[in-house]
């Protein structure tokens, strides 16, 4: 590699980095459905309703009562607190990546009922 080529190497913008990282977690609409359902199950859901339009391309709706306060922030999780917790993980997710990844590649709308 020539010096001129090296000087053109630059950090990707954060938005691009997030989309690339999200592509490893959310490849197809079915991945969104899987992650959302697992999120609900981990949160203790007893009833989940899923609606899909056009194979999940136009709409994926998951109805379940839960608080999403920090769930769209990368690495926000209620499960993992320290590395020593890793061997004890018995949930579907614990890294705090799914909801953030979905938010990078889809428009999310949340409705709450109190």
Image (cartoon, rainbow, N blue to C red):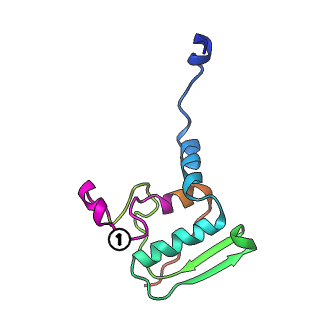
Query: Foreground: 51 or 2?
Result: 2
Q: Position of residue 95 (x, y in %)?
A: 40, 58
Query: Foreground: 87 or 113?
Result: 87
Left or right: 102, with 55 as reference point? left
Residue range corresponding to the magenta coloring? 80-100
Q: Secondary structure at mark 1?
A: loop
Name the quadrant containing residue 3: top right
Q: Is residue 91 rendered magenta in the image?
A: yes
Q: Position of residue 94 (x, y in %)?
A: 38, 63
Name the quadrant containing residue 114: bottom left
What residue sits 46% from the left and 58% below the top?
97
What residue sits 35% from the left and 71% below the top?
90
Q: Which residue is under mark 1?
A: 90
What residue sits 38% from the left and 59% below the top?
76
Q: Is residue 40 rendered magenta in the image?
A: no
Q: Which residue is at the far front?
A: 87
Q: Is residue 64 above or below residue 88?
A: below
Q: Is residue 15 above or below residue 94?
A: above
Q: Which residue is at the far right?
A: 54
Left or right: 90, with 48 as reference point? left
Neighbour class for label 1 at 10 Å: few (<14), some, many (≥20)?
Answer: few
| Number of numbered discs | 1
């Amino acid at each position: 590699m020539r010096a001129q080529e090296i000087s053109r190497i630059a950090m990707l913008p954060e938005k691009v980095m997030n989309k690339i990282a999200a592509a490893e977690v959310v490849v197809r609409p079915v991945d969104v459905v899987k992650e959302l359902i697992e999120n609900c199950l981990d949160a203790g859901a007893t009833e989940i309703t899923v609606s899909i339009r056009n194979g999940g391309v136009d709409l994926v709706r998951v109805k379940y009562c839960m608080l999403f306060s920090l769930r769209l922030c990368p690495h926000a999780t209620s499960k993992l607190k320290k590395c020593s917790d890793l061997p004890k993980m018995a949930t579907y997710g614990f890294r705090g990546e799914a909801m953030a990844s979905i938010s990078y590649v889809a428009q999310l709308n949340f409705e709450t009922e109190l």
